[in-house]
Image (cartoon, rainbow, N blue to C red):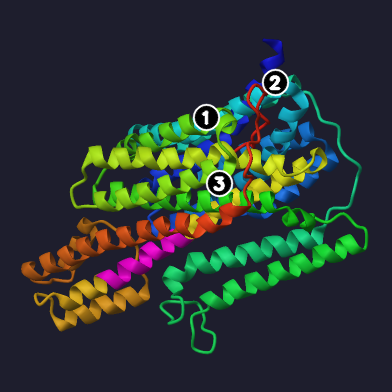
């Protein structure tokens, strides 16, 4: 039993890292109410959290290499605990963003890369495979428990208690930190500060442009802070981010030419299975976090469910994802990673199309639950293979750096998923509502004009009750109030379907990239499985 004590600490940390985002997603409506803000603002906070992790995950891994993994793990826990404490007490939205998105996100960038290395350092052979399996299972458990726990606490107590509880768990882990054997630090090298700045700024601008496209507009300005040659700044901001990322690649090659330690060894991207695995991880999280942003809005804003009821309806995806993800070692004995991942993508496509058919004014709980279970099955099939593909693509010396790239791909996918799918949702809502009121003869030209002005000023995904209240405050006749509300209700459903349809397109776009995944089994029958990657964010 003593040999498994390190796993208690490391597994608890992994569970916490995954719990946060799922709690936030089911609490969207309550956060909007508590902070008197809009859905798009909460979308920004969720996106910022995963963006911070995507931008600094590799940096966190480098710091762990230089300072020692256990020390970095402990420091990361302290930072994470401080962020959780601030989040639990946040009086305003910007404090929530500071505590959760920034400070907790930075803490996670120190904890997660160190965690993977500490597992490898604490266990050998078959024990290491078991340990990685347990860590992966706890990651799945965080996804499974998060919506239910977060939903129950948010509905019957307050979401703040989840983060207060995290502080208690962090203190307990710090008290037991000596259970975890340390991994000696590597040779001291100067941190590539230029690489950190260029990569972080580039990723931030790309995600910011996608996130703000719903309020700024893609080409035609809607409500931007400035314009560029009369156009919306969205594409220009994204292009600036892409230029910085190109500059980052040039900088990294120059660092290597000068025989200095780069932030990222770009030669790793020349390894086809690694490149394909990272692409699949990005696509997986893009779909998952995009849908986990959209679906709670359908359940809470359209169906009027509370956070706990939302968590219950998300439970099938969490459970089937956990079960199918744990089948990785078994599947690896009978099928190649390429085959399993392709099957997973096809299952995701079926799930997304099925979900489209469930987006109706009255929810069919059975059909919705089955669609969510199929979604989890597809996600789990991908999760069962991709971590192992990434780790098996490189030698032992590059495992830490490959792990950092793995977490970066996962969290960049999460950021873009929330930003892109959320942006498409709002854009589709504007278009659908404008079309609906334009085609409705019961709505006067004056109301159409007022609605158009309101849309140009910015729109949020609100309930039909709020739309009705606004129309009644405008002293519209009752028949016109009903017509506006009906038009908005139809636009809501159309925009949700458009967002899910966009998510359904991602597996199709990802399919060609599976060609570079391993076409042979990574595990031979009768031999222990290679360690799988640890999920994060």
Magenta part of the chain: 420-432
Q: Mark 3 vs mark 1: which is more N-terminal?
A: 3
Q: Do the residues labelled 1 and 2 touch (CB within 8 Å)?
A: no
Which percent across, then down, holds residue 132? 64, 28
Query: Farthest top residue?
Result: 1
Q: Is residue 427 located in the magenta-colored stretch of the structure?
A: yes
Real-space Cα separation, disc 1 to disc 2, in angstroms: 16 Å
Please count the marks in the image. Answer: 3
- Of the pair 293 and 174, the residue shown nearer to us: 293
Query: SS class of the residue under badge 1?
Result: loop
The answer for how far apart the CA atoms under marks 3 and 2 are is 37 Å
Residue identified by numbered label 3: 100
Dot 3 lies on which element? helix
Left or right side of 71 for 302: left
Q: Which residue is drawn at 59% across and 66% down?
A: 206
Residue bearing mark 2: 126
Quarter placement of the N terminus = top right
Q: How crowded is mark 1: few (under 14 residues within 10 Å), some or many (20 or more)?
A: some
Overall secondary structure of the magenta section: helix
Location of residue 38 with respect to 312 vertically, above or below:
below
Viewer can see residue 156: yes
- Does the CB distance between marks 3 and 2 fall below 8 Å? no
Image: 432 above or below 534:
below
Quadrant that contains the C terminus:
top right
Q: Residue furthest bottom?
A: 229
- Give the label on residue 356, or none: none
Instruction: Estimate how packed mark 3 is, as few (under 14), some (14 to 19) or many (20 or more) residues with alpha carbons within 10 Å.
Output: many
- For the residue carrying disc 2, how many other residues have a C-alpha within 10 Å: few (<14), some (14-19), or many (20+)? few
Residue located beneath label 1 in the image:
327
């Amino acid at each position: 039993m003593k040999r498994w004590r390190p796993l208690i600490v490391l597994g608890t940390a992994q569970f916490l890292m995954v719990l946060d985002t799922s709690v936030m997603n089911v609490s969207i409506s309550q956060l909007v109410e508590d902070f008197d803000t809009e859905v798009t603002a909460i979308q920004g906070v969720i996106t910022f959290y995963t963006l911070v992790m995507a931008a600094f995950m590799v940096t966190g891994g480098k710091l762990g290499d230089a300072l020692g993994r256990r020390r970095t793990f402990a420091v990361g826990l302290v930072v994470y605990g401080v962020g959780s404490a601030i989040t639990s007490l946040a009086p305003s939205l910007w404090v929530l963003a500071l505590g959760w998105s920034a400070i907790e996100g930075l803490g996670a960038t120190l904890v997660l890369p160190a965690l993977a290395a500490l597992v490898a350092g604490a266990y050998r052979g078959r024990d290491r495979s078991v340990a990685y399996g347990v860590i992966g299972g706890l990651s799945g458990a965080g996804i499974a428990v998060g919506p239910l726990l977060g939903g129950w606490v948010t509905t019957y107590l307050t979401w703040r208690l989840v983060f207060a509880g995290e502080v208690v768990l962090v203190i307990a882990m710090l008290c037991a930190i000596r259970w975890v054997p340390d991994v000696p630090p590597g040779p001291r090298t100067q941190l590539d500060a230029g690489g950190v700045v260029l990569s972080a700024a580039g990723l931030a601008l790309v995600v910011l442009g996608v996130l703000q496209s719903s309020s700024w507009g893609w080409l035609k300005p809607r409500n931007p802070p400035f314009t560029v040659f009369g156009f919306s700044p969205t594409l220009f901001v994204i292009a600036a981010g892409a230029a910085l990322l190109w500059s980052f690649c040039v900088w990294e090659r120059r660092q290597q030419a000068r025989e200095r330690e780069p932030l990222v060894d770009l030669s790793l991207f020349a390894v086809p299975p690694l490149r394909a695995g990272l692409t699949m991880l990005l696509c997986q999280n893009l779909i998952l976090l995009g849908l986990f942003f959209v679906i709670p809005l359908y359940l809470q804003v359209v169906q009027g469910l509370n956070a706990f009821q939302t968590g219950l309806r998300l439970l099938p995806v969490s459970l089937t994802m956990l079960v199918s993800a744990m089948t990785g070692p078994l599947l690896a004995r009978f099928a190649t990673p390429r085959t399993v991942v392709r099957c997973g993508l096809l299952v995701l496509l079926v799930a997304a199309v099925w979900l489209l058919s469930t987006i109706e004014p009255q929810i069919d709980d059975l059909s919705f639950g089955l669609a969510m279970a199929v979604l989890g099955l597809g996600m789990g099939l991908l999760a069962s293979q991709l971590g192992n593909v990434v780790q098996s693509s490189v030698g032992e010396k590059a495992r830490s750096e490959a792990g950092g790239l793995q977490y970066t791909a996962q969290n960049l996918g999460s950021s873009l998923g929330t930003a892109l799918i959320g942006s498409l949702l709002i854009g589709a809502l504007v278009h659908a509502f404008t079309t609906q009121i334009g085609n409705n003869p019961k709505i006067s030209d004056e109301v159409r004009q007022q609605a158009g002005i309101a849309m140009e000023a910015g729109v949020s995904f609100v309930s039909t009750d709020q739309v009705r209240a606004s129309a009644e405050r405008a002293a519209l006749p009752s028949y016109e109030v009903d017509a506006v509300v009906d038009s908005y209700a139809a636009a809501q459903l159309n925009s949700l379907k458009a967002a899910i349809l966009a998510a359904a397109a991602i597996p199709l776009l990802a399919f060609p990239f599976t060609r570079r995944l391993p076409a042979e089994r990574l595990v031979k029958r009768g031999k222990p499985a290679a360690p799988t990657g640890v999920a994060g964010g």
